[in-house]
Image (cartoon, rainbow, N blue to C red):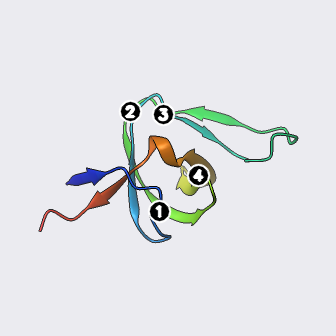
Amino acid sequence: MKTKQNKEAKPGHLVYVPSETLLVESEDPHQTTYLFTLQEPKVFLVLERSESSYRVLHKGQKWFVPKNKSYEVKNDS
């Protein structure tokens, strides 16, 4: 598995997210939100993308992860 930091991974692509990365339930700073810190690195399927983050599925819930903390997974071949 190769990874490449890419700010434009498309929905359906996989992204690698390192441990200690903070996932948030909402991007709206005026809305109460839940936070989750990854205890170990994970690979997520991109559901949506916004200007600064990707929406991913983790444990049955949708979360936002910052693009600058995400690395697109590339096929080795």
Please state which of residues 50 and 75 is positioned toward the viewer in this rendering: 50
Sort mark 2 into few (<14), some (14-19) or many (20+) by Cα contacts within 10 Å: few
The mark lying in front, picked from 2 and 4, is: 4
Which image quarter holds the C terminus? bottom left
Pick whichever of labels 4 and 1 is earlier in the sequence. 1
Instruction: Say which label, 1 or 3, has the lower sequence index.
Output: 1
Q: Amino acid at mark 1?
A: Glu
Q: Amino acid at mark 3?
A: Leu
CA gap between label 4 and label 1 equals: 10 Å
Left or right relative to 9: residue 28: right
Image side of residue 76 versus residue 5, left or right = left
Q: Residue shown at 46%/28% (left/top)?
A: 20
Left or right position of 76 against 50: left
- Which callout, 2 or 4, points at the residue further toward the start of the chain? 2
N-terminal of the pair, mark 2 or mark 1, is: 1
Residue depth check, mark 4 versus mark 1: number of the one nearer the observer: 1
Q: CA distance from mark 3 to mark 4?
A: 16 Å
Secondary structure type for disc 3: loop
Badge 3 vs badge 2, beta-carbon distance below 8 Å: yes
In which image quadrant can residue 14 be found?
bottom left
Q: Residue 10: x and y, percent?
A: 47, 69
Taking depth in this image into account, of 69 and 59 the one nearest to the observer is 69
Residue carrying label 1: 8
Residues under labels 1 and 3: Cα distance?
22 Å
Question: Is 5 or 31 nearer to us in this picture?
Answer: 5
Task: Check disc 2 and report the residue beneath it.
Answer: 40
Q: Tell me the residue that label 4 is attached to.
A: 53
What's the residue at 46%, 41% (across, down)? 69
